[in-house]
Amino acid sequence: MIPKRPPLTSVVQEAISRFIEQQCGIRLGPEKGYLVEHRLVPVLQHFQLTSFEALRDRLMDKQDHEMRDRVLEAITTHETAFFRDRHPFEALRQVVLPQAAKRWQATRASLGRAAGPIRIWCAACSSGQEPWSMAMAILEWLPLCGVPGLAAGDFHILATDLSARILEQAKRGAYTETEISRGLTPGQVARFLTRPVGAKALQEVRPELRSMVEFRRVNMQEPFRTQGFFDLILCRNVLIYFADPFKRQICESFHAMLHPGAYLMLGAAESLFDISESFATERHGDTLLYRRP
Ligand SMILES: C[S@@+](CC[C@H](N)C(=O)[O-])C[C@H]1O[C@@H](n2cnc3c(N)ncnc32)[C@H](O)[C@@H]1O
């Protein structure tokens, strides 16, 4: 019989938290004891364990990937929305996309042939609303941008996350009415979503969006510079969970992966203050953009 709420001692909490931080960078200090307990009780129940000590011991068994993934899944927050915060997408249309398009044109002119795609990376994409919003914003912007020859096929959005489960959901691109109503206008719903035959509750993204986005599992706690070079990196609402040394390490890699003049966008509550001085900060309305000089 599993007790409803087995006790979590500070020693065991520290061991579990240390393991989580080593695996994915999420820092859970002693003050987060309640959160750890609350989120991990369902994991205990799933594995029919009677104590947090037993959970810790299974976590320490490096072969137990199922346990590790369940724990990380339980601890991470996947909160997201279409066009989250709205104002960053204005900065995208007014500043980031026009500058990326200029770079694309200059490369094409110097090569004398088609340039490679404009690359955008959503580095913690959760259930996909962020990369799909990005693709929608690009498709809305393209007819107005006045750049001859630039088309949807010249954009590539890489969308990554730690969680394989949430990535499956993102890739499916199917959303409930509640999720859709959080951020999409009726015009965007009509243009970019479609109701699959027989589906009452869900609408899914149209193929023109799918062809722009690629999903991959990337844990930022592991080396990730092999993902290549980008015109824009979005890393929104995830750095807040990490300790400063880890934030510094990640931002240093982002800096190395951006083309000169390209941008990094963080979440509305995040900043590079005390984290990196390598970027030039630009304010556009309510949005802070970090540019690689
Ligand atoms: C709160 S969501 C943010 C989603 C989206 N960027 C937004 O702002 O709406 C945070 C996401 O970060 C992911 N995450 C946490 N640690 C990570 C890591 N080490 N590497 C990659 N993704 C991570 C989680 O799985 C979760 O989906």
Image (tube, helix red, strand yellow):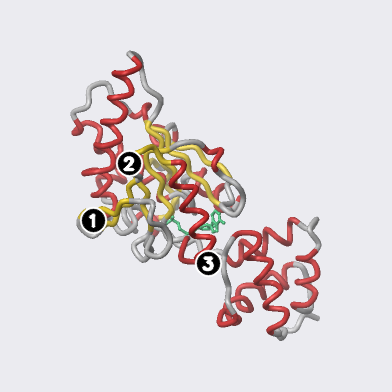
User: On the picture, is 169 further left or further right than 183?
Assistant: right
Mark 2 closeness class: few <14, some 14–19, many ≥20 residues within 10 Å: many
Label 3 CB sits under 8 Å from any ligand 1 atom? no
Q: Tell me residue 88's x, y (percent).
A: 29, 53
User: On the picture, is 216 further left or further right than 80?
Assistant: right
Eye-nearest disc, 3 or 2: 3
Name which residue type carries label 1.
Arg
Vertical placement of 256 versus 45: above or below?
above
Instruction: Work out whether mark 2 precedes mark 1 in sequence or the reverse, and give the earlier one.
Output: 2
Of residues 3 and 190, the one nearer the viewer is 3
Q: Please say if the residues under marks 3 and 1 sit with CB atoms less than 8 Å apart.
A: no
For mark 3, give the secondary structure. Answer: loop
Of residues 249 and 12, the one nearer the viewer is 249
Eye-nearest disc, 2 or 1: 1
Report the quarter where the C terminus lies.
top left
Q: Residue at x 80, y 55 (%)?
A: 63
**Label 3 – label 1 distance at C-alpha:** 25 Å
For mark 2, give the secondary structure. Answer: helix
Q: Which mark is residue 243?
A: 3
User: Which residue does the numbered mark 2 point to in the structure image?
Assistant: 136
Name which residue type carries label 3.
Ala
**Label 2 – label 1 distance at C-alpha:** 23 Å
Residue 5 visible in the shown view: no
**Label 3 – label 2 distance at C-alpha:** 33 Å
Q: Tell me residue 176's x, y (percent).
A: 43, 55
